[in-house]
Amino acid sequence: MKLVNVAKKSYKDYLCFMSEKDKKELYFLIEKFKDKKIAMVNATEFGGGVAEILHSLVPLMNDLGLKIDWWKMYGEEEFYNVTKAFHNRLQGEEGDLNERDIEVYLKYNRLNAMEMQGCDYDFMIIHDPQPAAIIEYRSIENKGKWIWRCHIDTSTPNLQYWKFLYNYIVKYDAAIFTMEDFVKEGLHLNNIHFITPCIDPLSLKNVPLEMEEAKEIISKFGIDINRPLITQISRFDPWKDPLGVLEVYKIVRKEFPSVQLALLGSMASDDPEGWEYLYRTLRRAGEDYDIKIITNFNGISNKEVNAFQTASDIVIQKSIKEGFGLTVAEALWKGTPVIGGNTGGIKLQIEDGVTGYLVDTVEECARKVLRLLRNLSIAEEMEKAGREKVQKEYLITNKILNYLRLFNKMCDS
């Protein structure tokens, strides 16, 4: 278990994104919880939406006067192989849970729990399946409230995996899901709440970038800035369907031969399957030089992601399953039209035909891409609606307030 160091942030810089009513509520709750100790626990400090959110959430909450630590759990490759299977199967993938996987999973949860012995927190927020069993090994003197935060779609899970995990998450004082649709039918957990993920409007990834600078940045990766570009930014993962995006591009290119495709992805330490799927994507792309497949090992960081989202004509997030899809909110915030899979948290962000398009198939996605490429006025109409929705619902300021509301409710109950 490791304490993650985060860069400092000033919450005063974010007040412009909040209403006066929300500011008053925030200050009231901060005063109430300023002496409480809070811990966030997850599996990785880089790569993936959870880590990205925590890099903003933790320093901002600290700057507000709260006492919050972020712990990253320790794990070897065997652990992450097992938890990647948990991730996939809790989202419905078939497969059997064997005794060896259980042994590995519990071993690392036990080891990490031991590292936290003597750390007494008022609120423990445990993110996703990887550290969920830590609660089983907590010290007796730890009397704080334990909250399990699930970022994935567990509505139709592999039942073997779900029944195993349920033995641990039922011990929590509260559970947070992104949306009601993600809660398995008949679930009996304590205090179920719903909080969406969010973006940091002042992070390097989301701070406004001039179009000329954005185009200059993406040109360094071989993009012709004078031709249309469609982009998907996500892990290389079967649920994100990069192979389907390649098929969309091939259909579009038949009618719009000047189009280019960029697939950007960060390779995360807790996702060993990602490398295999990256290689599959590279093989499917072949030698088409208008397809750019770029990872953090090619020099992609947050500023480059910002540039691609800003300068692309269309951003796609063609997920088959999706907990939320931060890249949707990020692109909407920049005024770029988004076409997303009609699934999970993407449906919360995209109002079909208003802030973007929702699609179910490769063919439907290709039709919507062609429609936007041929009708620039539609994209312009979506720009304002998308940005307004993100400001109202999906900024980091909303996230902090929602956590404090939950703490308040738990203390009063």
Image: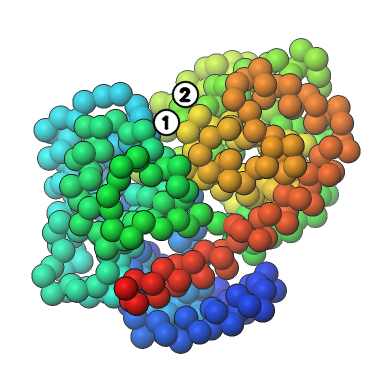
Residue 24, position in %: x, y? 59, 82
Residue, x 56% and y 65% (percent of image)?
Answer: 398
Callout 2–callout 1 Cβ contact below 8 Å:
yes
Residue type at tag 2: Tyr
In the rendered structure, find residue 275 and report the number of the disc placed on it: 1
Residue at image coords 46%, 27%:
238
Query: Which of 294 and 28 lies nearest the eye of the viewer?
Result: 28
The image shows residue 326 at horizontal and vertical percentages of 56, 48
320 relative to 83, above or below: above
Question: From the viewer's perspective, is 127 left or right of 12?
Answer: left
What residue sits right under mark 2 in the picture? 279
Mark 1 residue element: helix
Residue type at tag 1: Trp
Question: Which residue does the image show at 11% across and 70% down from the upper left?
Answer: 140
Along the line of sight, which residue is nearer the eye, 221 or 394?
Answer: 394
Which quadrant is the C terminus positioned in?
bottom left
Residue 126 place in picture, x, y as percent: 31, 58
Q: Where is residue 246 in the image (x, y as percent from the top left)?
A: 61, 21
Q: Is mark 2 on a helix, strand or loop?
A: helix
